[in-house]
Image (cartoon, helix red, strand yellow):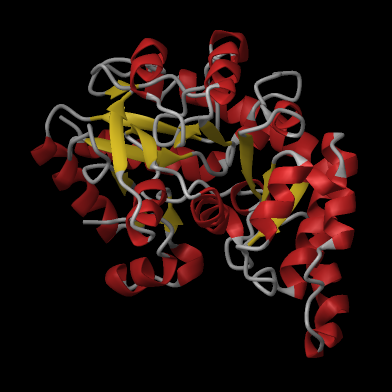
Amino acid sequence: MMEHGGRIYHYAELSQFAVKDVIDCSANINPLGPPPGVRDALDAALDAVRYYPDSDHEEIRRVLSDRFTIDQDTILCANGATECIEVLIKGLRPNRCVVLEPAFSEYAAAAYRLSCPVVRLSLFDGERFVLPIAQLDQVLLQGDLLFINHPHNPSGTSWPLQSWIEAVFTWAKRGVSIAVDESFADFLPQEDPRTVMQHAACVQNVFVIRSATKIFSIPGLRFGFLVGTPEKMALLKAYRDPWSVNHLAQVAARVAYEDLRFTLATAVWLKQVHHDWQNSWAVDARWHVFPTSVNFFLLRFSCAKESQRIQGELMKEGIYLRPCGNFQGLGDEYVRIALLSKTQNERVFQAVSALTF
C-alpha cells in the first residue's frame, strides 16, 4: 500500500516511461514551479556548498518575516514540514498527540517514533469533513498536542477561520498545544484570511507549520518552517539539527518567497483549473467528488474494486493517482488527484472517463 505520493522514479520504472513522461497526480506539486529565479540562484550558489550552511537561517528568516509580517524570532526553519512535526513533539514532550483522521501519516508516525501516545478522532462523517469542536472540548487535556491540518489533506477542505479559532484560543489557555499544519495554505486565495500565522506569533501554545515543497515545487530540496512565540521558538531550536536546512534549500526558498509574481501566477492558474474541474469532474455522476479549496481533490469511486481496476489501467499509460486506502477512515474506493497543467488535467479526466462504466 502506498504510504506517500510523488515516487516519480518508481513510477517510471513500473510503467517503463521516461520520468518526464509520467503524469504524477499522486503528489500535490505546483506545475508552474519552481519559480524562474530559483534555477539561476542555485547555479550562483553552488560554489558555497563547500561551506557549512547558515544554521541560524538569517536571510531566509528575514524574507519570511517581510513576506508574512511577523517577527524573525517567531520563525524556526526546518527540513520540510516533517522535521517541524518531529521538533514539536521532541521539544514540547506532550502527554499525548491528538490527530484528526484522515490525516497526513507523519503526525502519528513521528509520535510513535518518539514514544508519545496517539489519540485519533474522526473529522469525516461519510459525506463531509468537519472539525469536531465539541468532541475536542471533551477530549483535550493539559499537556496534549493537537494537530489540525488546514487546508485539509487529503480532502482539500478549508474551514472559515471564525468557526474554530476561538476554540483554539480556549484550548491554548488550558495548556493544550495546537499545531496548525498549513502546508497547502499558499494555494488559498490571497484575500482568504484562513491562516493562523499571525496568531501563532503572539499566542502561547499555538504553532503553525508551513512548507515550501508544494507551492514552489522543490520537494527535492526540502524547506519548511515553524511559527510560534519567541519563547517557544527559542525552546524548540535546541531540538532541531542545526545543519538540517542545506545552503541550496535556503537560497531556493529565499528567492521563491520573494517572487510575488509567481504567487500571483499560481493564483491565476488555480482559478482556471478550478473552473475546469467544476465543469468536468464535479458534474459527472459516475463518481463522487468532494469540494476543494486547493490544488488537489478527493474522489470516491463506486467501489474499491473499480477504483483499483482504474488505477491499474492508468498506470499502463504512465498516470498515477494517490490511493487513499491507508488514510484512516477512508477505503480503497477513495483516490486523491492533484491538479496539474490544463493539458495534463484534460488527459487524466479523459483517461478515467474512458475506463469508468
Which quarter of the rendered picture does the C terminus lie within? top left
User: Image height check: is 263 above or below 194?
Assistant: below
Nearer to me, 338 or 191: 191
Query: In the image, is 58 to the left or to the right of 153?
Result: right
| Whether residue 311 can be seen here | yes
Q: In this view, does 40 lie to the left or right of 253?
A: right
**In the image, is residue 10 above or below residue 302?**
below
Return the residue nearer the eye: 174 or 53.
Answer: 174
Name which residue lies at 78% across and 68% down: 39
Task: Give whichever of 350, 116 is nearer the camera.
Answer: 116
Q: In which quarter of the image is residue 208?
A: top right
User: Where residue 340 sits: x, y (%)?
Assistant: 53, 43
Q: Position of residue 183 (x, y in %)?
A: 58, 42
Q: Is residue 71 above or below residue 217?
A: above
Q: Which residue is drawn at 36% across and 39% down?
A: 336
Locate residue 12: give its quadrant: bottom left
- Residue 94 image position (x, y, % from top left): 45, 44
Q: Is residue 259 visible?
A: no
